[in-house]
Amino acid sequence: MSRNRRSIGGGASTRGTSIVLLLFIALASPGLARSQSPATAPQPDVPAITYRRVFKGSSPEFVEIVVRQDGAAKADVRQLSDPASPQDFTVAAAIRGQIFDLARQLHNFQGQDLDVHKRIAYLGEKTFRWENGPEAYETKYNYTVDAKATQLQKIFENLAQEQADLGTLEQELRYDRLGISDALNRFEEHLSQHVLPEPARFLPVLDRIAGDERVIESARQRARSLAAQIRVAQGQ
């Protein structure tokens, strides 16, 4: 009998312990859930605008720039035969403000027919696309006379040129230092034409060229001069 009583007594103790643990978990769970909710909450969608140009036989043949409203961006500038190689970068607030303001004036491309619809030379297919989560609108055209669309296209094409010049300088510094002078020539030409939206993006590579003793001295001096010119213009 004593063994039975001990058995019954042990079961009661186990049940009592289980009840206490369940109560503790129940009391702790709301606080635990609250502490975890910020990390597990879904992030809000961020509006993004994409510009794409495809024109076989041109250089570059493929341009795709994606700019999010928070400034995060991707650029893929290449020939069609090359593999896709999107590069991450950041667009300054002033430029992305222009981009999204022009898109807003174009109703975020909803129901927009921008093509001139006249018999003109083929200049490549351009696409504007606005998206925010599941909502998306886009329009395609060969050539447009819409002033806002033309201005928006120019901003994106300038961003593409900037990305191409930056990529060329990086590539020449890494693989062909003798080609740096020509790359600096193209960069300086675009800089003087005010084609490049954010010249300060070039400062890191210009500083590396200026400090690399494997690069010919004339190119190093030129890189220093161009970097100084950009810093003065930026008020640095």
Image: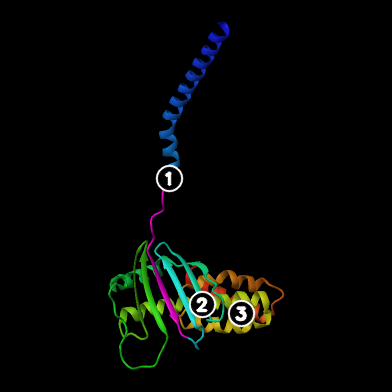
Mark 3 burial class by Cα count in 10 Å: few <14, some 14-19, many 20+ = some
- The image's colouring method is rainbow
Identify the amino acid type marked 2. Val
Amino acid beneath label 1:
Pro
User: Closer to the camera, 234 or 44?
Assistant: 44
Image-based side of 195 in relation to 81, left or right: left
Mark 1 or mark 3, which is nearer to you?
1
Question: Where's residue 45, x and y in %?
Answer: 38, 58
In the image, the segment drawn in magenta is 41-55
Going by the image, does 197 lie left or right of 223? left
Q: Is residue 5 left or right of residue 40?
A: right
In space, the residues marked 1 and 3 are separated at their CA atoms by 50 Å
Residue 120 lies, in percent from the top left, at: 36, 93
Residue pictured at 31% horizontal, 73% vertical: 109
Q: Residues under labels 2 and 3: Cα distance?
A: 26 Å
Relative placement, left or right, of 155 versus 191 is: left
Percent x, y for residue 148? 31, 78
Which labelled disc corresponds to residue 77? 2
Q: Which residue is mark 3?
A: 222
